[in-house]
Image (spheres, rainbow, N blue to C red):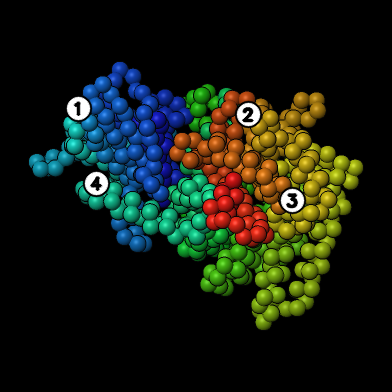
């Protein structure tokens, strides 16, 4: 909950930024080669090979991988320890424990620290050793330092640190890598077994707080743990993903930096956490929001740094070849300066849900919400860049207008529940009129009566998967013919052969790109979950369940999802793991479970086993 490491199937740590999610990477081979930083740990074979088995240990972020070799079976346990005490900042640290299960296995550790996204090779030093302690060395470059504590000597060859060692059945050995500002000196030694036990206990206890007990609990818990892991504990900010520039189009330019806090993504993450019983995370995010927008809520940005930073200047790292040759590799995000009116709706919706679920009122949050509505009242009629951050002209996107309506609607409901509050009745009447005006505007200008569907933007013909949210936010009821027509139109025009959903057409009828970018993109997983939600809402529950099951099957073997699914290459694409994919997974699971409960409550009493069977089909 400070940063994250991505570990490949062959035991290599290919990506890690330090000390924060959005810091420069220490290991960047994911976007380049081993020379851009990695840490291999596995059996000492001529070429690294994938583990025969890997899994998370129960409901945790503790990873274990096992290799079967001719000489025996070995397990590597990887984890980042949680803070030692409540309120303490977590330390950016990876602990890798090797244990032989059978036989005798020779292992190899190859550590290549490269600071600055693989550009800077550090100097390696060996501090005076503790005669009774592990081997210790440090790699330093400017303000950055990593410290390696290992039971085994690592030879240094041009700042590549290599060790070969043997473990026998029942033996256990550990390697600890700690990031530390170079001026702070050596970190204290750690008890790896104690840290492992404490970290597993933390995750299991956290997962046990989940109030969802339905048939999709395994998938929901894994998604919740992933969202918690994407939270920057010192501030409460939630990153969209821990990576940058994993491509949406393999070999193309649709590569973006997601290591920041999008208000939209964080708000919907907060909503999912609240609906599954996690109120402390909601409180922490609300405090983060108040700090991030303090003093200038009218100039709300769509994203911030994880501590609330506003400057996220976008640039390219030309020394990195990119994931499978996908360039450019970007850091920072130029979309931070875009106008996206839908963000106001998502933020207000999250604040409203926090209030409705009993989170203690915060007067500053209440005042912020009212100021956001004041801003929308003056600006909702302006064109914007929309939810998908298109790098083309601003338009009157229908989804943006719908979410402006949501912001006003939820604020009215809040004030109606607190009649003694400011603003005065005059404000309420004015905002009720505004809500009616926005609703009528969308229904008149954003709806195509000939095709019986809402469109992407006023006056356009294109569709947009964000229109699937119209019934989910309560703009229109699910049985409205315009809602049903829109769902069916999206199924016809934006669905792939697998039934998954594209965000919008990236090309017009002449083959020209419509969003200012070259190439194509895959099916957007969040949109596909939205379709499953909508199908359930209009009574096509079995079809919704079948789509949801196909979406669950796209997860990798550890239950993780990227941003998109490429229907041509049959693989996940985009930054990974992606909060914006795991949140709607949770929401759809809750909705389908509720549909099952409603179905069962309407049936005559039958054998208990029969009721359970029907509930899980």
Q: CA distance from mark 4 to mark 3?
A: 52 Å
Residue at x-position 74% and y-position 38%? 491
Which label sits on residue 104? 1
Q: CA distance from mark 2 to mark 1?
A: 44 Å
The reply to whether residue 270 is visible in this rendering is no
- Mark 3 vs 1, N-terminal side: 1
Q: Quadrant of residue 121?
A: top left
Tell which of 433 and 301 is nearer to you: 433
Question: Which residue has dot 4 on it?
Answer: 192
Tell me the element at label 1: strand
Front of the two marks 2 and 1: 1
Tell me the element at label 2: loop
Residue at x-position 30% and y-position 36%? 76
Compared across the picture, whether 582 is left or right of 148 comes to: right
Compared across the picture, whether 152 is left or right of 402 comes to: left
Q: Is label 2 in contact with label 1 (beta carbons under 8 Å)?
A: no
Question: Which residue has dot 3 on it?
Answer: 538
Label 3 environment density (alpha carbons within 10 Å; few <14, some 14–19, many ≥20): some
Tell me the element at label 3: loop
Q: CA distance from mark 4 to mark 1?
A: 22 Å
Question: Which residue has dot 2 on it?
Answer: 567
Front of the two marks 4 and 3: 3
Q: CA distance from mark 3 to mark 1?
A: 60 Å
Which label sits on residue 339? none
Residue at x-position 63% and y-position 32%? 522
Label 1 environment density (alpha carbons within 10 Å; few <14, some 14–19, many ≥20): some
Front of the two marks 3 and 2: 3
Q: Is label 3 in contact with label 1 (beta carbons under 8 Å)?
A: no
Residue ranking furthest to the top: 46
Tell me the element at label 4: helix
């Amino acid at each position: 909950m400070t940063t994250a490491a991505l570990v490949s199937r062959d035991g290599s740590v290919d990506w890690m930024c330090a000390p924060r999610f959005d810091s420069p990477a220490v290991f960047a081979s994911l976007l380049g080669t081993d020379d851009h930083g990695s840490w291999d740990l596995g059996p000492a074979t001529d070429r690294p090979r994938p583990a025969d088995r890997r899994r998370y240990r129960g409901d945790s972020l503790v990873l274990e991988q096992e290799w079967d070799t001719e000489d025996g079976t070995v397990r590597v346990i990887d984890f980042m320890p949680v803070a030692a005490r409540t309120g303490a900042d977590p330390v950016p640290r990876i602990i890798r424990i090797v244990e032989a299960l059978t036989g005798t296995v020779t292992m190899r550790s190859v550590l290549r620290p490269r600071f600055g996204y693989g550009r800077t090779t550090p100097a390696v030093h060996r501090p005076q050793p503790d005669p009774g302690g592990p081997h210790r060395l440090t790699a330093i470059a400017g303000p950055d330092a990593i410290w390696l504590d290992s039971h085994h000597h690592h030879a240094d060859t041009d700042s590549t640190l290599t060790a070969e060692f043997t473990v026998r059945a029942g033996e256990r050995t550990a390697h600890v890598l700690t990031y530390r500002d170079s001026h702070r000196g050596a970190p204290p030694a750690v008890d790896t077994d104690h840290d492992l036990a404490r970290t597993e206990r933390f995750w299991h206890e956290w997962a046990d707080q989940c109030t969802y007990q339905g048939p999709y609990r395994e998938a929901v818990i894994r998604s919740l743990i992933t969202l918690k892991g994407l939270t920057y504990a010192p501030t409460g900010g939630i990153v969209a993903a821990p990576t940058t520039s994993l491509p949406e189009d393999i070999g193309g330019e649709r590569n973006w930096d997601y290591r920041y806090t999008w208000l939209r993504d964080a708000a919907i993450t907060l909503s999912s956490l609240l609906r599954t019983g996690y109120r402390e995370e909601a409180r922490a995010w609300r405090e983060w929001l108040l700090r991030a927008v303090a003093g200038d809520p009218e100039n709300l940005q769509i994203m911030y740094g994880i501590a609330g930073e506003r400057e996220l200047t976008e640039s390219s790292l030309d020394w990195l070849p990119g994931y499978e040759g996908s360039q450019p590799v970007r850091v920072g995000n130029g979309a931070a300066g875009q106008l996206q009116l839908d963000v106001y709706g998502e933020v207000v919706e999250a604040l409203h849900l926090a209030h409705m679920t009993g989170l203690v009122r915060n007067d500053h949050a209440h005042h912020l919400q009212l100021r956001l509505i004041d801003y929308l009242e003056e600006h909702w009629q302006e064109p914007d860049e929309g939810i998908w951050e298109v790098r083309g002209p601003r338009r009157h996107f229908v989804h943006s207008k719908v979410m402006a309506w949501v912001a006003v609607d939820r604020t009215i409901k809040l004030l109606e529940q607190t009649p003694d509050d400011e603003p005065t009745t005059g404000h309420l009447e004015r905002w009720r009129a505004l809500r009616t005006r926005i609703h009528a505007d969308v229904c008149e200008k954003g709806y195509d009566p000939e095709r019986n569907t809402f469109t992407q933007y006023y006056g356009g013909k294109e569709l947009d998967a964000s229109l699937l949210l119209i019934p989910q936010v309560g703009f229109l009821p699910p049985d409205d013919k315009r809602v049903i027509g829109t769902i069916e139109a999206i199924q016809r025009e934006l669905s792939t052969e697998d039934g998954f959903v594209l965000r919008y057409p990236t090309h017009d009828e002449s083959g020209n790109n419509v969003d200012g970018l070259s190439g194509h993109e895959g099916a957007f997983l969040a949109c596909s979950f939205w379709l499953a939600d909508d199908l359930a809402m209009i009574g096509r529950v079995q079809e919704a369940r079948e789509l949801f099951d196909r979406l669950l099957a796209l997860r990798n073997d550890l239950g993780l999802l990227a941003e998109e699914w490429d229907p041509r290459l049959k693989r996940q694409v985009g930054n990974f793991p992606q909060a914006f994919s795991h949140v709607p997974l949770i929401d759809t699971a809750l909705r389908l479970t509720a549909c099952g409960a409603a179905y069962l409550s309407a049936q005559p009493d039958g054998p208990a086993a029969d009721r359970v069977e029907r509930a899980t089909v």
